[in-house]
Each structure stands twice: as C-alpha cells, then as structure tokens.
C-alpha cells in the first residue's frame, strides 16, 4: 500500500500542530522577521533525486510534490529588523561552499541528530521544520 504524502493522518497532525504553533507563538514572532519570501524555482534536480528514492512507497506524482512545494510558505528566519534582503536559508550565506561545509549544510537541512542515553541506547531526534 502506497502512502499519499499530503492526506495521511501523520502529515495532517504535523500540519495542524505547525499551524497552531504559528498562530500562538510569541517568542519567534517577536524575535524573527518571518516575512514570506517568494522563491523562483529553476532546478528540481534535488527534488527529483529524493523522489526517486521514495516513489515506490508513495502514491503522489512528482508534479504533485512540486506543486505543493510551490505553495508552501518560505519565511525569513533572520532577526527582526535585519538589514539586507530576507533569507529562509541563512546557512547558504554563513558557510562558504567546500566539501566540509556541504556536509554541515546537509546535516542542518536534514536536522537529524543521534542522541545516546545513559543506557547506551541510541535515539534519533528528527526535527521537521515547516517553511
């Protein structure tokens, strides 16, 4: 059975929690710019590469994923009243492009970290950031 990425219970639950947080949060709304950023999409190679890895498990077509991505909000995560233009990917300007920083950037984007507890069990902490 294939999963529809945008109509399953887990996705809907995450989206509702995200919207609730957005509507009730004061810390981030008082600290960050959060202006909506218009992004022009020219290159979907990275999207397609990811899609190829999961297409056997999902019912969505690649075009649906691109359409959803185009409607998703991209918010500026720089501090409120910053100078210069807004940015939703500050890691691109913080790190110069080298092999080492590409690894760091991928780690930031994927936001997956391993946490080892006292009993030597390894847990994955996965943070989903909605932009």
Image: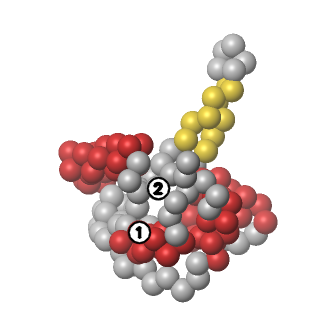
**Mark nearer the viewer, 2 or 1:** 2
Is residue 9 in view?
yes
Most foreground residue, 96 or 63: 63
User: What's the colour scheme?
Assistant: secondary structure
Residue 46, which numbered label? none
Q: Is residue 86 visible?
A: no
Q: Position of residue 48 (x, y in %)?
A: 63, 72
Residue wearing tag 2: 5
Instruction: State the residue at coordinates (46%, 71%).
Output: 64
The picture places residue 103, in percent across and down from the top left corner, at 72, 58
For the point 69% across and 13% down, the residue is 119
Disc 1 marks which residue?
A: 68
Estimate the x, y position of residue 2 in percent, counting from the top left: 55, 52
Q: CA distance from mark 2 to mark 1?
A: 10 Å
Name the secondary structure under disc 2: loop
Q: Looking at the image, do the residues carrying marks 2 and 1 touch, with CB atoms under 8 Å apart?
A: yes
């Amino acid at each position: 059975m294939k999963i529809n990425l945008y109509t399953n219970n887990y996705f809907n639950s995450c989206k509702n929690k995200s919207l609730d947080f957005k509507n009730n949060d004061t810390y981030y709304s008082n600290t960050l710019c959060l202006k909506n950023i218009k992004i022009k999409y020219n290159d979907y190679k990275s999207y397609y590469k990811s899609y190829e890895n999961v297409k056997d498990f999902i019912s969505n077509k690649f075009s649906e994923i691109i359409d959803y991505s185009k409607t998703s909000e991209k918010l500026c995560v720089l501090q409120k009243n910053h100078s210069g233009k807004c940015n939703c990917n500050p890691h691109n300007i913080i790190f110069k492009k080298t092999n080492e920083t590409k690894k760091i950037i991928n780690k930031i984007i994927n936001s997956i970290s391993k946490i080892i507890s006292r009993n030597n069990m390894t847990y994955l902490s996965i943070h989903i950031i909605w932009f």
